[in-house]
């Protein structure tokens, strides 16, 4: 082979196997991988040397020992720059030239050098390194593990890489939420969108309004439809709840996520999807009485009354506690699926429209959104809402999450709003993984509905930039996978639906311009072993849309 060809053979994407030099199978695929000669032998005697200071660095580096301590039976020593050895060392450097969240990883037989702009990039370098460990080694105690020599340069395509979990329909406890955050971080996802309030349950303790959790976190009946009957988890007629997170638990989860470089975005869905709050405080509704925490799925016409000033007091009080709990710059206010029929009959709402010169109920919802956004901005935060908030006109500063399709996102991007793409036909990973329902758990789908499914490859192929000019593309901040839980009442099933599809989402989010289905499927075989090691539940059939 000529020198030129030999060099070409070394310059490869991930997962190219080069005999005697090992391979690199990492998902999401790094931007650039060059395999080199030899291996670095990682052993209990390997030292981690920190060559800069950053408040987040201890959390980033903690990942190494979470992974290695169970294998080696002891943690690697972590030292400062002065004590860094010449060999058998993982050096961690700062480099101002590296993009946000990006890193370089230079693995040679004598050292592993990591460079990043800050701790966030260091964390991702270590996530990459974790996937480069031979998974067989993870199975038991070993004296050392070899990592193939390689040079990796990497940075995310999108700055927003999200995963939504709905805990309103079914509740998932603190440990389960932490596990989902671990899974997100492993795939280099950086936002966890916590959908905390629903018609069917209010899940966040609000000190000023105790009835939200005393009344709103419990419903009288399990649902009339749902796979849980097929799976025997709940019986119809049994109450569900009370289930909610205390503020102390929320702080714990926020801290846990921060240590994994995941920002939690809380969602308080308003003015629709609020029946649990109306049941707790009936004055918040237009009718003012007779509300019960909803015991069926679907959309309720009982929404908040945005004519009454007391509703805005409530929203601001709740958000004040929410802002205190969640440092996230972004706060999600929902805005989806809000029927406006009650407003047409409500004297308070009609009076508000008249006083404000509003000519449609859609504009009344916009009025509500603007007030909430002004409140958030006053407190230094940014508002996100679902794409229905476009209907009555939206302020240019609002970030739009496009779920009903791609159209909302496209319209918002053209109008100059920041956009996160979450189109249900590509990113609602609560849907079954294939059309072959007989082969997909839970083997019993909801009655009365032709189940929609979402295959791994249709996620993988999706391009959030479709139909946008280069200028408009700049408004696409990223993508988010959603786990709506109407049909998901056990953690095992939640994990099953998440994996491996989150890995496909992660390649859209991180590796958009160098996706390659065959390479990805081959790398997934390796990632699966890591899922096995962690005991994660995942689908083993990788369906393509035409199968
Ligand atoms: C949604 O699925 N209603 C955002
Ligand atoms: Zn009203």
Image (cartoon, helix red, strand yellow):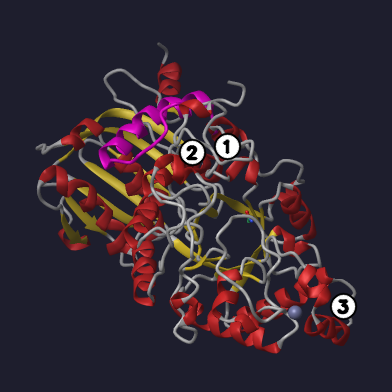
Q: Secondary structure at mark 1?
A: helix
Q: Secondary structure at mark 3?
A: loop
Distance CA(mark 3)–CA(mark 2): 44 Å
Left or right: residue 103 versus residue 69 is right
Q: Quadrant of ligand 2?
A: bottom right
Distance CA(mark 2)–CA(mark 1): 8 Å
Front disc: 3 or 2: 3
- For the record, the magenta segment spans 515-541
Q: Tell me if mark 1 has few (under 14), some (14-19) or many (20+) residues whose alpha carbon lies within 10 angstroms of its own.
A: many
Q: Tell me if mark 3 has few (under 14), some (14-19) or many (20+) residues whose alpha carbon lies within 10 angstroms of its own.
A: some
Query: Which is the main secondary structure of the residues drawn in magenta?
Result: helix
The quarter holding residue 449 reads top right
Q: Are marks 3 and 2 in contact (CB under 8 Å)?
A: no
The quarter of the picture where the C terminus appears is top right
Q: Secondary structure at mark 2?
A: helix
Distance CA(mark 1)–CA(mark 3): 41 Å
Q: Report whether residue 50 is seen.
A: yes
The quarter holding residue 420 reads bottom right
Q: Find residue 381 and name its label.
A: none
Q: Find residue 358 and name its label.
A: 3
Front disc: 1 or 3: 3
Q: Tell me if mark 2 has few (under 14), some (14-19) or many (20+) residues whose alpha carbon lies within 10 angstroms of its own.
A: many
Which residue position holds label 1? Answer: 459
- Say whether residue 229 is magenta: no
Among numbered discs 3 and 2, the one appearing first in the sequence: 3
Relative to residue 211, is residue 300 depicted above or below?
Answer: above
The residue that appears at 68% across and 60% down in the rendered structure is: 418
Residue in front for this viewpoint, 294 or 367: 294
Residue at the far front in the pictured view: 237
Which residue position holds label 2? Answer: 501
Q: Are marks 2 and 1 in contact (CB under 8 Å)?
A: yes
């Amino acid at each position: 082979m000529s020198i030129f060809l030999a060099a070409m053979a070394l310059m490869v994407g991930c997962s190219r196997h080069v005999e005697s030099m090992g391979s690199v199978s990492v998902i999401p695929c790094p931007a650039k991988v060059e395999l080199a000669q030899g291996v670095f032998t990682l052993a209990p005697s390997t030292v981690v040397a920190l060559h800069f200071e950053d408040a987040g660095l201890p959390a980033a580096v903690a990942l190494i020992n979470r992974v290695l301590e169970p294998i080696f039976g002891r943690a690697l020593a972590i030292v400062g720059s002065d004590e860094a050895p010449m060999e058998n060392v993982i050096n961690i450097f700062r480099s101002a030239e590296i993009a946000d969240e990006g890193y370089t990883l230079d693995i040679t037989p004598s050292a592993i050098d990591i460079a990043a702009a800050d701790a966030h990039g260091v964390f991702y370098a270590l996530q990459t390194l974790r996937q480069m460990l031979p998974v067989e080694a993870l199975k038991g105690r070993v004296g050392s593990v070899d990592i193939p020599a390689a040079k990796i340069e990497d940075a995310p395509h999108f700055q927003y890489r999200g995963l939504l979990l709905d805990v309103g329909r079914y509740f998932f406890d603190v440990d389960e939420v932490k596990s989902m955050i671990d899974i997100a971080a492993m795939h280099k996802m950086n936002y966890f969108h916590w959908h905390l309030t629903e018609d069917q349950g209010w899940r966040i303790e609000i000190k000023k309004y105790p009835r939200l959790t005393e009344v709103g976190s419990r419903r009288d009946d399990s649902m009339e439809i749902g796979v849980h009957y097929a799976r025997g988890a709940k019986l119809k007629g049994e109450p569900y709840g009370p289930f909610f997170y205390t503020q102390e638990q929320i702080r714990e989860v926020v801290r846990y996520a921060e240590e994994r470089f995941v920002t939690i975005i809380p969602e308080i869905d308003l003015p629709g999807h609020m029946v649990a709050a109306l049941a707790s405080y009936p004055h918040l509704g237009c009718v003012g009485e007779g509300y019960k925490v909803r015991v069926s799925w679907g959309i309720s016409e009982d929404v908040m009354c945005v004519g009454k000033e007391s509703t805005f007091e409530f929203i601001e009080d709740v958000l004040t506690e929410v802002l205190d709990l969640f440092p996230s710059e972004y706060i999600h206010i929902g805005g989806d699926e809000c029927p406006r029929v009650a407003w047409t009959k409500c004297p308070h709402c009609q009076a508000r429209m008249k006083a404000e010169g509003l000519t449609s109920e859609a504009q009344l919802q916009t009025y509500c959104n603007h007030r909430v956004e002004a409140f958030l901005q006053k407190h230094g935060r940014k508002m996100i809402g679902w794409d229905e908030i476009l209907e009555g006109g939206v302020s240019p500063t609002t970030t739009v999450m496009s779920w009903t399709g791609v159209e909302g996102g496209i319209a918002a991007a053209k109008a100059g709003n920041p956009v996160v793409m979450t189109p249900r036909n590509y990113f609602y990973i609560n849907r079954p993984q294939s059309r072959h329902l007989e082969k997909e758990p839970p083997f019993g789908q909801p009655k009365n509905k032709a189940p929609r499914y979402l295959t791994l490859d249709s996620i993988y192929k999706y391009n959030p930039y479709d139909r946008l000019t280069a200028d408009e593309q700049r408004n696409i901040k990223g993508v988010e996978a959603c786990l709506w839980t109407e049909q998901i009442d056990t953690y095992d099933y939640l994990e099953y639906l998440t994996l491996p599809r989150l890995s496909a989402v992660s390649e859209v989010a991180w590796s958009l311009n160098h996706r390659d289905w065959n390479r990805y499927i081959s790398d997934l075989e390796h990632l699966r072993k890591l899922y096995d090691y962690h005991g994660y539940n995942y689908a083993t059939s990788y369906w393509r849309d035409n199968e």
